[in-house]
Amino acid sequence: MPIEIRPLSTSMGAEVLGADFSKPVSNEDFASILQAFYDYQVLAIRDQNLSPADQIAFSERFGTLEDQLNSRYILPEEPKILVLSNDVKPDGTPVGLIDAGDFWHTDSSHRPLPSMATILYSLKNPDEGGDTGFANMYAAYEALPQSMKDSLDGRRAVQAVSKFKNKRVVASERRPDATEKYTEQMAIPDALHPAIRTHPVTGRKALYVSQRFTIGLEGMSEAEADPILDFLFEHQTKADFVYYHHWQDNDLVMWDNRCVIHRATGGYTYPDVRLMHRTVIAGDAPY
Ligand SMILES: [Fe+2]
C-alpha cells in the first residue's frame, strides 16, 4: 500500500499514513518522506511500532545522529536516544528529562553546528496536555516588513545555552538539576548565527531566532537589540504560522530545525505520564 500524506494545518505539517518503519525503509518510501519533510517541515508518521534500534535505523536514513547533550537520560542500550518523560522509577529518580523545550526554540541553535532535524517517538501520552507547538519560520520571514528584512539581512544573532543568560526565560521548577546545569553552562561560549538563514535544500529564507536561545544581535547594544528581538519573538509565533500537534500514541514526529521553531506546552502532571524517545540528526553551519 502506498504511503499517504495529508496536510495537518494551513501553516505547516502533514501526517503520514500507511507506513511501517519497523521494517527497513524502501528507497521509494524514503524519497516520499523526504519530499514531504521539505514540503511540510513537520511530519507526524502515525501508528509506528518501533524498537529503539528501529528508531535509530529510521533516523540514520536522514544523516548522522548527534550524541545526546543530556547523558543522564539516555537509553543504556541505544545511547543516541534520549528519554523524555515525567515518569518516576521505583527509587524515586526521574525516568527521563522533564519539561524539555518549554520556551520557543530551534534545537541547539546555541552550538556552532545546530541540529538539522529532531525525531520524537511517542510511546505514551498523558490524558491531558503534552501538545507540541510548531511555528513556520519561512512564513514568519516572508511576512516581515521589508524594513525589518533589510535591517536583519547579513546580521548575526547571539545564541546562548544557559537560561541564566537570558532574561526572557525561566528555569523549570520541576527539573531537579536545573540550577546546577544552567550555572555550568554559563561558561559555554555563545554561538553567532545569521538571524535570517537560507535552507540548504529548498533555498528558502527562514527567520532563525528564538526566545529560548537568542539573547542579542551582533553589533548592537542591548537597548538597540531588545525592541527588535521583542518584535521578532511576538511576530514569529502569530497564529497564522503556528500548528499545535496533539499527540497520538505511536506517533513518530520529525521536524526541520532549519525552518521551524517549537515549544512543549506541558500541562500534564504525574501520575499522568508522558514518555518519548528522541533522536537528533546533525546539521551544518547556518548561512
Ligand atoms: Fe527542542
Image: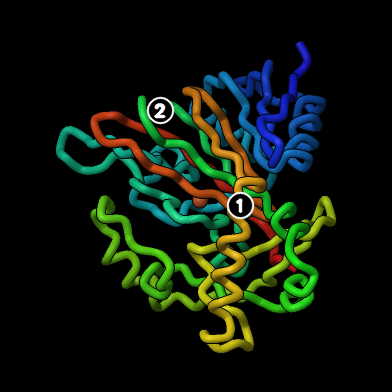
Most foreground residue, 174 or 231? 231
The reply to whether residue 64 is in sight is no
State which quarter of the image contains the N terminus.
top right
Which mark, residue 61?
none
Which element carries disc 1, helix, strand or loop? loop
The picture places residue 81, in percent across and down from the top left corner, at: 47, 41
In the image, residue 34 above or below residue 281 = above
Q: Residues within 10 Å of mark 1 (few under 14, many from 20)?
A: few
Q: Is residue 144 left or right of residue 109?
A: right
Q: Which mark is residue 125?
A: 2
**Mark sitting on residue 238:** 1
Q: Crowding at label 2, few (<14), some or many (≥20) Cα neighbours within 10 Å?
A: many
Quarter residue 45 falls in:
top right
Residue found 60% across the figure and 40% down from its top: 243
Q: Tell me residue 73's x, y (percent).
A: 36, 46
Ligand 1 contact, mark 2 (Cβ < 8 Å): no
| N-term mark: 2 or 1 | 2
User: Judging from the image, what secondary structure is the residue with disc 2 in?
Assistant: loop
Q: What amino acid is found at the position of numbered circle 1 in the picture?
A: Lys
The alpha-carbon separation of the residues under discs 2 and 1 comes to 26 Å
Q: Front-most of 178 and 147?
A: 147
Q: Amino acid at mark 2?
A: Asn
